[in-house]
Image (spheres, rainbow, N blue to C red):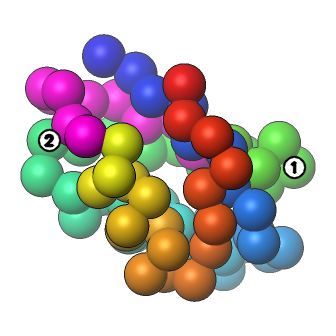
Amino acid sequence: MTKKIYIEGMSCNHCVRHVEEALKDIDGVMSVSVDLQKKLATVELARAIEDEKFKSAIYEAGYEVVKIE
């Protein structure tokens, strides 16, 4: 299962690493790939995870989720 998370507020590679670490800490996340230019995180999941967990982790990291697909 894959989720695409569109994120506002990232401006550099440090931001990318910060978002990757925040998402990887969520139980059930297998891998994370963040594209700074597209403002997009692609997350591979081992199981279904509520969108609120992604929103919360990204918000706590200092960024804003625009939408999740």
Which residue appears at 42% of the width and 36% of the height?
A: 43
**Do residues under tags 1 and 2 come within 8 Å of each other at their CB atoms?**
no
Q: In x, y percent, where is residue 36?
A: 78, 55
Residue under label 2, please give it.
Answer: 28
Residue drawn 75% across the image and 70% down it: 10
Closer-to-camera residue (69/43): 69
Q: Which residues are magenta?
A: 41-50
The percent coordinates of residue 49 (x first, y second) are: 21, 37
Q: Position of residue 16 (x, y in %)?
A: 63, 66
Question: Which residue appears at 75% of the width and 62% of the height?
Answer: 8
Membership of 15 in magenta stretch: no
Q: Earlier in the sequence, mark 1 or mark 2?
A: 2
**What's the CA distance linking mark 1 and mark 2?**
26 Å
Query: What's under tag 2, amino acid-wise?
Result: Gly
Answer whether residue 43 is magenta in the image. Answer: yes
**Residue that badge 1 annotates:** 37
Badge 2, how many Cα within 10 Å: few under 14, some, many 20+?
A: some
- Above-or-below relation of 50 to 65: above
Left or right placement of residue 41 versus residue 56 in this view: right
